[in-house]
Image (tube, rainbow, N blue to C red):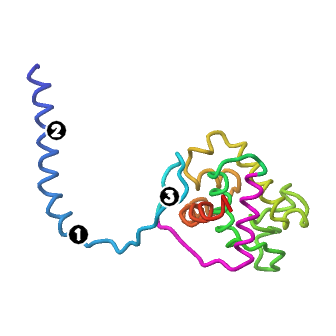
Amino acid sequence: MNTIMRKSVLSVAGLAFAGGVFAGPIAAHANPVDAKPVAATVQTSAPKPQGDQSRIPLNGEQTANVKAIIAATKKAGLPERAAVISIATSLQESKLENLGHLGDSNDHDSLGLFQQRPSSGWGTPEQITDPAYSTTAFLKGLTQVDGWQDMPLTEAAQTVQVSAYPDAYAQWEQQATDLVGQYWNS
C-alpha cells in the first residue's frame, strides 16, 4: 500500500474512532424517548412508516368506510399495501368520513373519503361520495404510478392526490396498516 493511501485509511479510521469516543458518552446520557411500541400486522416489502405517527379512534361510520376501502381494493385484485395507502390517504383527507359539501370551509369542491373534486374529473358528486366508487377511482390513479408498491406511502399518495401538504399522509401509515391487518380477512 502506498504512503498516501495508508495515510488516508489511517485518517478515516482515526476520525471514526474519535467520533465514537465523543458520541458514545453523549448517546449514553441522552434522554429516552417516550414511545409506545406498535406492532405491525401487515407484512409487506414496503418501507417502514416515516416520521411521527397519528392515531384517532374510529366510530361505526369510519369503520364501515375502512371495510368499504378494503372491499374495493380486493375487488380490484390489489394487495394489502394498496389498502394501506388508500386508508392512510382517507385518514388524512377526511378522517375516514364521507364528507359532503362543507360550505366556505370546503377546499374548493372536494368531496368524499378522499376529498376528490368533480371539477378535476374524479366523477360526479354522487359518485365521489360513494365509498366504493371513490376508492376505485383512487386505486386507478395509484396503479398508474410506477413503483407505487415500493415507494414511501406519502409519495405514492401525493402522486395521486396532489395535495398542498404532501408529507401529511405519512403520519397515518401505522394506523392504516393496523386497520388492514384487522379487517383484511374478516
> In the rendering, which numbered label is found on residue 147?
none
| Image quadrant assignment for residue 158 | bottom right
Amino acid under disc 2: Val
For the residues labelled 3 and 1, the Cα–Cα distance comes to 24 Å
- Residue lying furthest top: 2
Question: Residue, x 65% and y 68% (percent of image)?
Answer: 91
- Residue 63 on the magenta segment: yes
Q: Amino acid at mark 3?
A: Pro
In this rendering, which labeled residue sits more in front, label 3 or label 2? 3
Tell me how far mark 3 sits from mark 2, CA to CA: 33 Å
* Pick the front one: 43 or 147: 43
- The image shows residue 36 at horizontal and vertical percentages of 41, 72
Q: Which residue does the numbered mark 2 point to in the structure image?
A: 12
Q: Is residue 112 magenta?
A: no
Residue at which label 3 appears: 49
User: Of callouts 2 and 1, which one flags the residue occurring earlier in the amino acid sequence?
Assistant: 2
SS for callout 2: helix
In the rendered image, residue 73, in percent from the top left (x then y), is placed at 73, 53
Bounds of the magenta span?
52-74
Is 86 above or below relative to 37? above
Q: Quadrant of residue 98?
A: bottom right
The circle drawn on residue 30 is 1
> As displayed, is residue 62 above or below residue 24?
below
Quadrant of the rendered image containing residue 106? bottom right
Left or right of residue 84: residue 73: right
Q: Is residue 136 left or right of residue 169?
A: right
Q: Is residue 111 left or right of residue 172?
A: right
Of badges 3 and 1, nearer the viewer stands 3
Q: Main secondary structure of the magenta part?
A: helix
Q: Secondary structure at mark 3?
A: loop
Q: Which numbered disc, 2 or 1, marks the residue closer to the eye?
A: 1
